Image: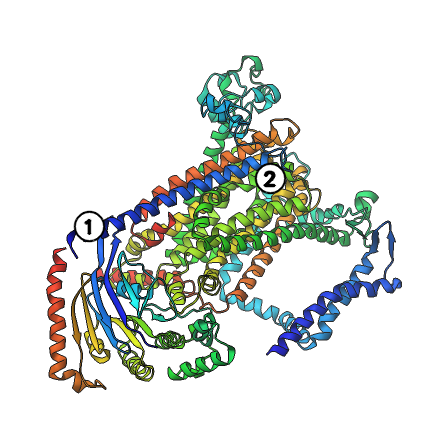
Amino acid sequence: MTSTDVLDVRAKAQREKRRRRIASIVYIAIGITLFFVAWVLLSLEASPWHYDIPPPFGAVGPFQDILQGVWGLFREEGAIAHFWSNLGTSQDMRIKFVHACPDLHPANVNNPFRQVASSLMGWKYTSDTAALTGGPLPVPIGQLPDYCYGYGIHLIVTIIRILLGAAFGTIAGLAIGLSSLVFPKVAQVFTPIASFFGTAPIFIAAPFFVIWFGVEVPIMTTIGLVTFYTTLLMYFFSRRAAENIPVGIVESALTLGGTPRSIFRWVYLPGTVPEIAGGFRIALAGAWGLGVLVEVLGIQVGGGHLIDIWRFLIGQLQAPSALVALITFYGVLAVVVDALLLVVIRYLTRWSEAGRRLGL
Amino acid sequence: MSLTRLLRILFWVGWAAWIFGSGLVVLAFSSLGDWQFEEGTLHLTWQFISFWVVLWWAYTFVFRYRRSAAAVIRIGKGIVRLPERILNAVKNNPLFFITWAVLLVGWQIVSYIAPKGTLEHPLVPGFDYIIYNALYRLSGNWDLFGGFSLPGLTLQFGELAPFPAIEGAESRTWTAVFLALGFHSFMTLSRLVAGLGVGLIAGLATGLALPYWSALRQISWAPFNFLRMIPLLAAIPWMQFALGVDLRATTLFIGFGVWVMLVVATMNAVANVPDRYIESARTLGASRLRTYFKVVVPGAMPELRTALLLAGGLGWSLTIAAEFLGFPTGLGFMAAAAVQETNTARLVIVAIVVAFYSLLTFYGLNQMFNRMVSWMPQRVSGTTDISKVAGAAGAAGRAGDQLHE
Amino acid sequence: MSRVVSFEGLWCVFEHRSGQLVNALHDVSFEVQPGEFVCVVGRSGHGKTTLLRVLAGLQPPTAGQTRLGDTVVEGPGADRAMVFQQDTVFPWLHVRDNVEFGLRALKVDDEERKSTTAHWLDAVGLTDFADSWPRELSGGMRKRVALAAAMAVGSDVILMDEPFGSLDYFTRRNLHDVLLDLWEETQKTIFFVTHDIEEALILADRVILLAEGKLVDDIPVDLPRPRDEDVRASAGAVDITKTILAHLGITEEEATQV
């Protein structure tokens, strides 16, 4: 066999490799297209869910919209268009439900930062609050600037609350879970509690947080529930991750003269990262829904509250668009955050087979 | 071999037939329970139902008397040995019980010192309040005035216990409390079972079918992974708008959630079946289809345990949350009613009941799973108690420190 | 019935994780007569397993072809059953069902299937364990199950990829005896991949030496059987060992340069 033949063989292998890579991209593209096709089909007039499912894009005329450019797709009514036009400022919110405006305290209204801060707490300043606390009267609706009206501020505060809750819960869960490796008594105390609360559907804890915190410290409704939930999950995941470290490795570390401290630092801590990281992804994916739903139940500012409002205005023309748009937003948000997490996790677990497999 | 199989099939066919047969027997003896047939609807009483259930299960006792007797004896022995077992458990793991005792006593103490609030009910109710006040008042949820209706069938329960909602607070009874809990549990469980059943079957079927074709697997990857990430709890308000509030709606909704989750989990499990099994089967001459059903499917099962349990948890969450947000019956509704009255005590009761049921669900799913994979080696990694090793590490470390000193 | 196995200009190019292309097989050609016991020897990562996987039809070659008699190998099939290095006994099937697996796939009728299975279970000495789960067996016993399953499908060629590599010395010696008995009884062609020269001397009619994917030598082993300690200590055996070691030594230097 000559050297040209060798080159031929190698070129063939390379072509095959490229073909597979392109094919997988094409398949993913087909999948995404099919998803939108299914969505459009479900929203057509012939579909039984015509009134419940808005089309993802505006009604696309075959010719005009193409002439208007791709932007035409997003302009008319449709879930994406609705979300976009209500994100910063919202005519719907201004006209239909002024009470959705987060804060009408004069000192806050012209200060976006204080606006976000008080929205984050979930406090609302209304004429009732003014009468109760003897504060200044709330600003009349006509004088309000636009920025306090859109979906944006509600969604941002919800995201911050949920991330805070997840962070607290992760710290607590890992602290308990990992310390139980060094102090077995901790595990004996916590495992029964955690497995009791862990088996019950966590949603049943939501009403407690609503009753206990909903009125006085509303922020704790979301943060508290998400923290509770994340603590439980991260406790389980850290325990399981440690259990899956082969005993042989720990024993080998012992024979090498490892102290509890050094074994914890150099064996347990890095060894549990892949599973703990995977667990965190699962916990966070669940936290979005939980955090939003508890806001639906009883907190006056936040993304969940938007869903609650549209729930009661369900007869309105825009309601399906609004609900579907908000739900889709949380889905996209979860996917984006998950993708970011994946990048970080891949870096942290680059030594591990399981870590590499996380990325599929 | 084949005779026993035939007998077993006969037994179950007879069992299924007897469900109706026993009903007809009871109908024939009208003295056993009043029944009427009006305008295409059958009106039955609770006596009828109880006789029917007794007759229905009598079949099992008659045809499998040995097994049934063994079961009865086993249960009896279990009850007799219960105190001994509890005592042993306390001896083996005292911290478990101490923890729980501390938690419960702590709650009671907190209930005395916590602020009462301006509300009718205490924010942290003591167990006395929970049992004698809230639990007793649950009889108010016994409100099946019109009976329980299915298409073509109405069950009357009025004679069992008076309805306090109509007859006033004096007619509260403990019977009504348990009837209320039973009825609402039944509603929740039926919604859960329908949704979970549809979701499990559809999810396993889809998840096992898609990876058979490599193209389909790759195409479905993106849509399913997006659907999986949608927070379904947040979608409940829209679901009730789009699907309504009935059994069909909850079945579709819970089924959808479980389906999406299981499809992704099953596809992952299939992808993780070791290649060597597949290759071995192929070199032994098995066709692709055969390899798939005999090797890939059973090989994927062990990884599905967690997915099954998670599906159970998801089903429970979706059911309770959906009921909370707009159904007039079910445990979720009871929780919502409790929040309306800011009645924490009632909430505690509902939470305990729900926790109990979901424990049972997990146990059941686990048992079902264990039957499916009886070939599986016992878990090796999980049985090693790492805390003991960590304790050993501690002991060794301390010994080492002393040596250094 | 038995057919000549021929490899014709086989190339196999793989992509390394770094994106680099590697020749797992580099223009390999040779023929094997029916009933031969061939050991493929080489250092790990030098193409032994790839050669076997190509013959099994699990790995399409980048260029060249493999033929069994007149038919070109295009995919896996029961005419080339394989015993793997790892544990491939299906843990979800009883031992008996594992041995029957291939026969069921071939749709052999019940009577014949049962008698064949019983025969091979007896041949590997596992009749008493027919109804056990694989998890209840030792590693060596599981290997016997895999061997019985491969023998039972009645293929002309048996492929064995370091099958006894993970077993202890005594179990391995025992399985060599079992394998040689089966081979003498059935006269099947056997391809046996190993990195153990002693194992090759015990088993092989012929040793194929692979280095960096190239066929570097084809050594006939015409020692008398049974190959007990004396035979392996004879001058002929020592010569063969030296030849093999010499080849591997040369390639070792080349390998360190890469």
Q: Amino acid at mark 2?
A: Ile
Which image quarter is the C terminus of chain C in? bottom left
Q: Amino acid at mark 1?
A: Leu
Q: Residue at x 49, y 57 (%)?
A: B304
Query: Residue A268: image x %, image y %?
Result: 33, 54
Q: Residue furthest front?
A: C70
Residue at mark 1: A7
- Determine the image quadrant of residue A213: top right
Residue C131 vertical placement versus B381 (above, below): below
The dot on residue B236 is 2
| Mark 1–mark 2 distance (CA, rounded to whole Å) | 60 Å
Decide if residue B126 is in sight here: no
Q: Residue at x 53, y 62 (%)?
A: B369
| Residue B162 left/right relative to C78 | right
| Residue A316 left/right relative to B275 | right
Label 2: state its secondary structure. helix
Label 1: state its secondary structure. helix
Give the mark count. 2
Mark 2 belongs to chain = B
Q: Residues within 10 Å of mark 1 (few under 14, many from 20)?
A: few
